[in-house]
Amino acid sequence: MIALDPIVQDALTEIFNLGIGQAASVLSSLIEEEVALTVPEFEIVRKNEFLALAKEQWQGLASIVRQEFDGPFSGNALLVFPARESLQLVRALLSNGSTIDTITELERDALLEVGNIILNACLSSIADCLGQEIVNALPVYIEAEPAAIVADCTEDPFGHVILLRIQFSVQKEDVRGHILFVLDMPAIDAFSQAAQRLIENYPS
Amino acid sequence: MTAIESADADASLAAVGIAELAMADIADLPIMEHADLGIAVIDRAGRVVRWNAWLARRSGVSAAAACGRTLETLFGERLGRRISVAVRDCLDHRRAQILSPTLNRMPFPLFAVESGQGSREPIEQNVSLKPLGTTAGDRFCLIQIADVSAAARRERFLRRQADELAHTVEELRLARDAADIANVAKSEFLASMSHELRTPLNSIIGFSQLLQIDSDPGTGADQAEFVGHIVAAGSHLLKLIDDILDLAKVEAKRVRLSIEDVPVAQVVADAVVGLRALAGQRAIRVGFNAGDHVALKVRADATRLTQIVSNFLSNAIKYNVEGGAVTVSVVPLAPRQRVRIMVADTGRGIPLDRQSQLFQRFNRLGAEFTEIEGTGIGLALSRQLALLMDAVIGFDSIPGRGSRFWVDVPAAAGESNRRSGIELPPSTQALAAFGRFTVLYIEDNLANARLLSGLFDHIPEGQLIHARTGEEGLALARQACPDVILLDIHLPTIDGFEVLERLQRDETSRSIPVVAVTALAMSADIQRGLAAGFRTWLSKPIRLQGLLDILGALLTINGRAGGSGAGGTPP
């Protein structure tokens, strides 16, 4: 795990929460229900650390929305839910009370849109604060083991993963998931420098 | 390069040849106009700059009418709420976006063209927005709209089906639970009802047996025959009630087995003895072929296993041809640690098309139209009992030649080839050899007492004394010192178990063998009785042969050795 300057850590937490708050309000108006989204914490870990951790704690298939992005730093943004949670989330969002025990095609489309909204909002928030533009491609939906997808996102052995824990509250359901930004070494450098500049310009 | 790769290369070279010729023309082809997808391009100012034919037909807005206008002016209120914001975000921040059909009802007001002009069939849409252009220069938003109505309809249909299915499953579950409860209630009713039926049957069978034995030579042959019918019908009814009671108990899961090491030969001997009379009537030879395996032991409940073998035997005799043969054989099945007890007959066999119904309750496979008596419960019950003992029942049958039924029972652990003698009950005449003896019968029901005293009329050496209550019985036991005490379990004031305990405490009565007499011929009661100290039990209705067998056995054990003739009433 990479230790950040506590001020940087605080500033980034705030940026992520701003973004995700934005996403929550978009989702709320979409489904006309209160949606609460928070990022209680985040950390930056080396890719290999993450793979070891994932092998231990994230076994089994997960529902993953993957979006590539490009800008001052480029990489992949992933929204990851364990399969059961993703079903729980999408059913709470669509309030369809379905009894089918696997995710349907339309539900997968909905989950893809939800992932797109959340990931875009986070990228937006980061881009806004850095005063630079981050462009992203269309999202794709994958059911796979998170470790396999992260390994696929970057071949750089010095790559890093920004790991955000997120918590959804919708229709009295609490669903936990993760947002992952997978960056290669140059990208994480660019990100750190941008974050550092942000602090220097931060009104104290 | 492999063969496949080179073939691929040839094919692509050929394709390139064609492509080179057509390259210039393709760039000019109106591909967008032929796409099976809605395509629009919006410029930085939010104005439509491209609007393809697919979109024009489904929106009712021509390309000419659309170009140069914003989506908001084109559709006003009918434009989905999120689409404006998303297009703006795509243009301003170059962010690709997706609008899914379930979360966005009608992003664009589009209607199906297949259902004719002026159709109001809305199209379910999957919309994606992609930024085009460079950071510095012109920026555009590419909108692609896919019609997913068919998929959405299919999914709604599937969901409805799944919901209905889940609902049906739930209903079935409730119905099954209700049926299970009803079935247990039925079984409990049958169990208690059967018990109530046994009591009056005791008197019917007992007294008609007495009539048979006592029949005055002057009585007409007709009357003797009538009495014979009463005894036969009563016995049949009793068998039916016993079977129903057993089956009800198995189904209500109220059967307790006592699994122990049981000598197979004993089981077969008990079953054969019980059916000797029936075999005699039909002149059927019953043979036992155990070879070297005569001493094999199995893990089973002796009573229940005997019941199963008896059932096989009784079927083999009943459905045999007059003068046919029945063979019982015992074979160890080494690899499976089981012992097979098999009953083969030379009967009519079972028609192939009815073999699958063999174990159905009350299904007699057509025998209900013949003179052969039966209830159709035996095999169903046998199979249930076998399952409880971890035994398996099987059969094969050749119509016209005979059937074989077997039960594979787990072998006793450490089974040795030790030979065990088969104890056969003493014959009727044997009792005379014991000299005079006294039996005390403690029984509150006068009809039963009268019946037993009727039976004793046929045992000149035996003297029966009768007590109506436990207290009276205890006093008589001390006074008369009987050789055997027959004790009813259900007595007023103090019950049979209490009487037994007091008899055992008393110095003078301690050594007298006590036999439980009960209508509750259930193995649990029997087990409890034997554990309490009863030597054995006699189930009601008391039969002469059963009584003689037990008295013979007890008097032998008590040292009243047959043939001494010197016995008398004990001091």
Image (tube, grey):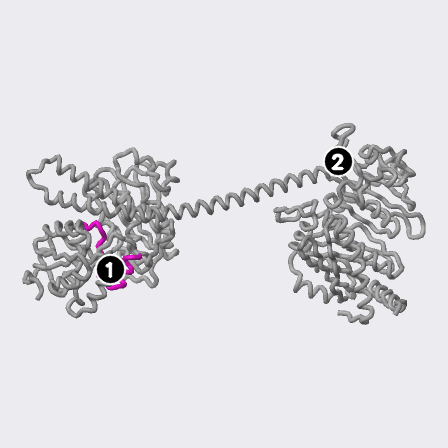
Residue B427: x, y in percent?
14, 53
The correct choice, above or below, for B73 with respect to A22 in the image is above
The CA distance from mark 2 to mark 1 is: 85 Å
Chain-order first, disc 2 or disc 1? 2
Residue B36 shows in this picture? yes
Residue B93: x, y in percent?
87, 52
Subunit bearing disc 1: B
2 and 1 marks in contact (CB < 8 Å): no
The correct choice, above or below, for B144 with respect to B522 in the image is above
Residue B532: x, y in percent?
26, 63
Front residue of this view, candidates A108 and B370: A108
Q: Residue B122 carries which label?
A: 2
- Is label 1 in a helix, a strand or a loop? loop
Residue B186 occupies quadrant: top left
* Residue placed furthest toward the top: B117
The correct choice, above or below, for B214 with respect to B267 in the image is above
Residue B74 occupies quadrant: top right
Q: Residues within 10 Å of mark 2 (few under 14, many from 20)?
A: some
- Is label 2 in a helix, a strand or a loop? loop
Residue B17 shows in this picture? no
Residue segment shown in magenta = B524-543
Left or right for B478, reference B80: left
Q: Which of marks 2 and 1 is in front?
A: 1
Q: Which residue is drawn at 9% across and 35% down?
A: B220
Give the residue type at disc 1.
Asp
Q: Are marks 2 and 1 on the same chain?
A: yes
Give the residue type at disc 2.
Pro
Residue A24: x, y in percent?
76, 54
Q: Residue B495 carries which label?
A: 1
